[in-house]
């Protein structure tokens, strides 16, 4: 051992506490992943609910918060803004916004790291303090990821946006007022921006072409607990009646359906058998349909879902889309499983313009994947809501072999690890720290499922 930490030691000691942890794994593949993993609160709700606590006049309590670095980033950003954050253990955070203050751009920049979350502080900070700063925004490198929808919406509420060399400064000299907003695309982040701003704006806001992901519905539930008045109609229309004040909330996060889908695809790829405790059918209907079409078998229980193969894997054609479509975050681990299916699958990515780059590493490992950066022509063209499409044509089954690969982003990184576990021989997977952004106790879970790996850096 010495420099090599054994899987069990590394998992318990390093994955849990801080954002400093293993960066390089040596993975020996070929063993099915079998056992149980517990999936807790959704990354894409917990971080937003933490920001919502800024809007309350009393303490909020958030439960089932995942121990991931995106949560740690938001926690530091809240603390920089004077919010008291106490960790009661077992995923319970207490957030007290009563001492909220402005923060310096450099402090925000330092704590935000690669996260895009600071943009969501704008509305709450404008209400609370009359101004907000946004540094250069990070997040996964999966496309340009602009913030124009956010800034346009904030301007409609009456915010003044100034671009400075160090970032963006927003102010609201006359306070924020309800607005009539139609998003060019049902963006998750821009919908959250509008919700977090409109709840305390003067008057009513009508938001059209809103995102309606389950995590957004859960954020609406959080805001309603705080005293907000929010209703929605079919066809992506949300009405928000601004109120004068909001209180804290006590809320248990919705489960992380992206993590649940990741482990489901890991079971398919490695020919394993994984019970994902905490997964629920309702929020995963679209995923489960595709999982079944690929040849997966699942059993739905009260406390989770069991995933495994139901026979030989079959090819599929899928197109990523906004909810209730097939999530863009589900395609990467699925593509690993599709390398083991008999025939040609096509995955159309229509949400981000650059989210198939991770397949280069799979090709290095022996997969037959051809990426069409501008989508497929003719009858194969699939464009959902936007003129944005990449397509991956995956032909299988191809045996995968070990390789030396570098993780590019969160979901791509998860897929690289699963590919290495599917492959024959040893792989070196680098830059795995990124996976801590969204998968809690990742190495613990791999160990529990029987993965054979060492931490080597
Ligand atoms: N977009 C714009 N302008 C904007 C905002 C978005 O053009 O101002 C574009 C984006 O570039 C992208 C599309 O709209 O092409 C969709 O972006 P959206 O705003 O919906 O995504 P997001 O809020 O930045 C969240 C999740 C992502 C998830 C997407 C789609 C968080 C922190 N992130 O991102 O999660 O893929 O919604 O559901 O909630 C992940 O978990 O790995 C992840 C990337």
Image (cartoon, rainbow, N blue to C red):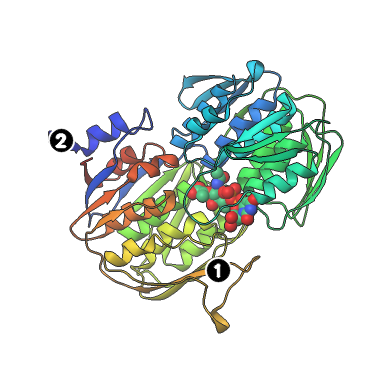
Image position, residue 431 (x, y; %): 32, 46
Q: State whether label 2 is within 8 Å of ligand 1.
A: no
Q: Is residue 82 visible?
A: yes
The answer to which of 342 and 443 lies nearer the viewer is: 443
| Extreme residue in the top direction | 99
Question: Could you tell me if residue 301 is visible in this image?
Answer: no
Residue 7 point in image, percent of width and height: 23, 39
Marks 1 and 2, the one that precedes in the sequence: 2
Residue at (40, 54) in percent of width and height: 412
How far is mark 1 from mark 2, CA to CA? 44 Å
Residue at the bottom extreme, as displayed: 378
Residue 54 coordinates in the image, percent (x, y):
65, 26
Side of 38 relative to 240 (left or right): left
Which SS class for mark 1? Answer: loop
Q: Quadrant of the N terminus?
A: top left
Residue 324 relative to residue 72: left or right: right
* Quarter residue 168 falls in: top right
Foreground residue among 221 and 149: 149
Residue labelled with disc 2: 3
Residue at the spot 65% in from the left edge and 38% down from the top edge: 219
What residue sits right under mark 1 in the picture? Answer: 389
Furthest residue toward right: 203
Q: Is residue 289 above or below residue 450?
A: below
Residue depicted at 63% across the width and 33% down the height: 133
């Amino acid at each position: 051992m010495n420099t090599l930490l054994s899987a069990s030691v590394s998992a318990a000691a390093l994955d849990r506490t801080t954002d400093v942890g293993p960066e390089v794994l040596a993975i020996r593949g070929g063993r099915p992943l079998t056992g149980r993993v517990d999936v807790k609160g959704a990354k894409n709700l917990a971080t937003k609910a933490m920001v919502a606590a800024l809007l309350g006049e009393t303490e909020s309590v958030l439960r089932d918060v995942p121990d991931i670095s995106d949560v740690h980033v938001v926690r530091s950003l809240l603390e920089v803004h004077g919010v008291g954050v106490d960790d009661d253990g077992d995923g319970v955070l207490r957030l007290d916004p009563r001492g909220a203050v402005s923060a310096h751009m450099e402090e925000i920049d330092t704590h935000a790291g690669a996260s895009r979350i600071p943009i969501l502080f704008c509305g709450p900070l404008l209400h609370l303090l009359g101004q907000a700063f946004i540094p250069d925004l990070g997040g996964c490198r999966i496309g340009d990821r602009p913030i124009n929808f956010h800034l346009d919406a904030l301007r409609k509420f009456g915010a003044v946006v100034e671009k400075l060399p160090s970032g963006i400064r927003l102010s609201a000299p006359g306070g924020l007022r309800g607005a009539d907003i139609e998003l060019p695309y049902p963006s998750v982040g821009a919908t959250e921006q509008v919700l977090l701003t409109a709840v305390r704006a003067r008057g009513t806001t009508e938001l059209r072409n809103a995102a309606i992901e389950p995590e957004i519905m859960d954020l609406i539930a959080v805001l309603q607990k705080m005293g907000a008045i929010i209703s929605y109609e079919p066809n992506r229309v949300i009405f928000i009646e601004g109120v004068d004040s909001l209180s804290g909330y006590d809320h248990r996060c919705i489960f992380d359906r992206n993590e649940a889908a990741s482990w489901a695809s890991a079971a398919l790829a490695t020919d394993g058998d994984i019970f994902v405790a905490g997964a629920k059918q309702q929020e995963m209907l679209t995923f489960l349909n595709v999982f079944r079409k690929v040849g997966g078998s699942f059993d739905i229980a009260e406390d989770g879902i069991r995933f495994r193969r139901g026979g030989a894997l079959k090819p599929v054609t899928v197109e990523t889309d906004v909810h209730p479509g097939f999530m863009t975050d589900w395609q990467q681990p699925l593509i690993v499983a599709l390398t083991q299916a008999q025939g040609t699958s096509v995955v159309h990515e229509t949400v981000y313009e650059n989210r198939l780059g991770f397949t280069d590493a799979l090709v290095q490992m022996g997969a037959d994947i051809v990426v069409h950066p501008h989508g497929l022509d003719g009858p194969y063209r699939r464009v959902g809501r936007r003129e944005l499409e990449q397509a991956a044509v995956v032909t299988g089954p191809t045996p995968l072999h070990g390789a030396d690969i570098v993780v590019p982003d969160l979901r791509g990184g998860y897929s690289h690890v699963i590919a290495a576990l599917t492959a024959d021989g040893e792989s070196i997977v680098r830059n795995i720290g990124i996976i801590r952004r969204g998968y809690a106790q990742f190495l613990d879970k791999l160990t529990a499922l029987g993965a054979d790996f060492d931490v080597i850096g």
